Image (spheres, rainbow, N blue to C red):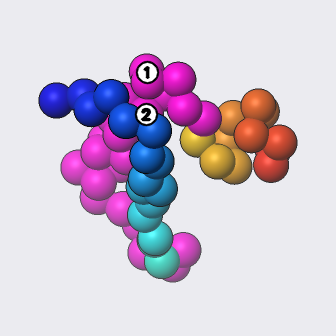
């Protein structure tokens, strides 16, 4: 359920660079990013408008 509020929450994940993610984990992260973008929010470090790329 979408909430109409002025509050923001940072959502993130941490991975170990030497460990390969499972297909399930990779799919989860892709879908999570799609949902975040569908609400108009950039993915920090990936989307140009955040200024970090």
Residue displayed at 58% across by 41% down: 43
In this picture, residue 34 sits left or right of residue 23: right
Judging depth in this view, the residue of 19 and 9 nearest the camera is 9
Q: Is residue 25 above or below residue 49?
A: below
Q: Visible in this render: residue 23?
A: no
- Dot 2: what SS? helix
Where residue 49 sits, quadrant-wise, is: top right
Where is residue 25? Give x, y as percent: 29, 54
The reply, left or right, for residue 2 in relation to residue 39 is left
- Residue 31 appears in the figure: yes
Q: Is residue 20 magenta?
A: yes
Residue that numbered label 2 is attached to = 36
Up the image or down, 34 lies above or below 10; here it is above
Give the main secondary structure of the magenta stretch: helix
Q: Nearer the viewer, residue 14 or 18?
A: 14
Query: Quick one: quadrant of the C terminus?
Result: top right
Question: What residue is at 48 percent from the left and 77 percent from the top?
Answer: 16
Q: Which residue is mark 1?
A: 38
Query: Which residues lie in the magenta part?
Result: 17-42
**Residue 51: x percent and y percent?**
83, 42
Q: Number of labelled discs? A: 2
In the rendered image, residue 19 lying in the magenta stretch gets the answer yes
**Numbered label attached to residue 16:** none
């Amino acid at each position: 359920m979408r909430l109409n509020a002025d509050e923001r929450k940072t959502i993130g994940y941490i991975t170990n660079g030497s460990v390969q993610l499972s297909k399930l984990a990779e799919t989860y992260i892709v879908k999570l990013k799609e949902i975040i973008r569908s609400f108009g929010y950039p993915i920090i470090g990936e989307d140009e408008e955040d200024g970090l790329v």
